[in-house]
Amino acid sequence: MPVVIQEFESESEEHAHMLADNRLSELAEMNNTSLKELLSDMDTGELDMDLTGFDTMALENLMTQFHVEPPDEFESFDETITTNFKCPKCGFSWSGEKS
């Protein structure tokens, strides 16, 4: 397995690099379709799948998900109904109420 050794000018620079690396993983989003294809192409007979960072249940859930295409047309809806929304990812809230 190739190993890359990174030399830093200072301990502070090394810590900044580690923090940035952790932050990037927080901001990353996976393309489940591509991930599923990549995992399907891997020779799992010769590989300890724990090395992927996914446990057995997470892999099973990912591999059994199916992709649903959105319909060409959506059903009509009553725009006068007041609704409130909250993004489950960022917590941003908004209302469907007309001003």
Image (cartoon, helix red, strand yellow):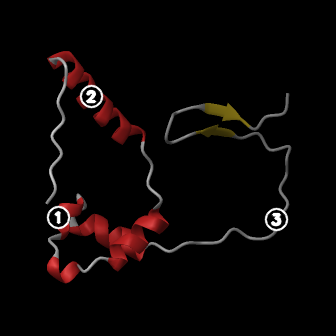
Residue holding disc 1: 50
Q: Residue at x 20, y 16 (%)?
A: 12
Reply above or below: 80 against 18.
below
Q: Secondary structure at mark 3?
A: loop
Q: Quadrant of the C terminus?
A: top right
Q: Secondary structure at mark 1?
A: helix
Q: Are marks 3 and 1 in contact (CB under 8 Å)?
A: no
Could you say which is closer to the camera, residue 70 or residue 74?
70
Q: Nearer the viewer, mark 3 or mark 1?
A: 1
**Residue type indicated by callout 3:** Glu
**Residue type indicated by callout 1:** Asp
In this rendering, would 88 be left or right of 74? left
Q: Earlier in the sequence, mark 3 or mark 1?
A: 1
Could you say which is closer to the camera, residue 86 or residue 12?
12
Crowdedness of circle 3 by 10 Å Cα count: few (<14), some, many (20+)? few
Q: Nearer the viewer, mark 2 or mark 1?
A: 2
Q: Earlier in the sequence, mark 2 or mark 3?
A: 2
The circle drawn on residue 29 is: none
The circle drawn on residue 17 is: 2
| Separation (CA) of disc 3 from disc 1 | 44 Å
Crowdedness of circle 2 by 10 Å Cα count: few (<14), some, many (20+)? few
Q: Are marks 2 and 3 in contact (CB under 8 Å)?
A: no
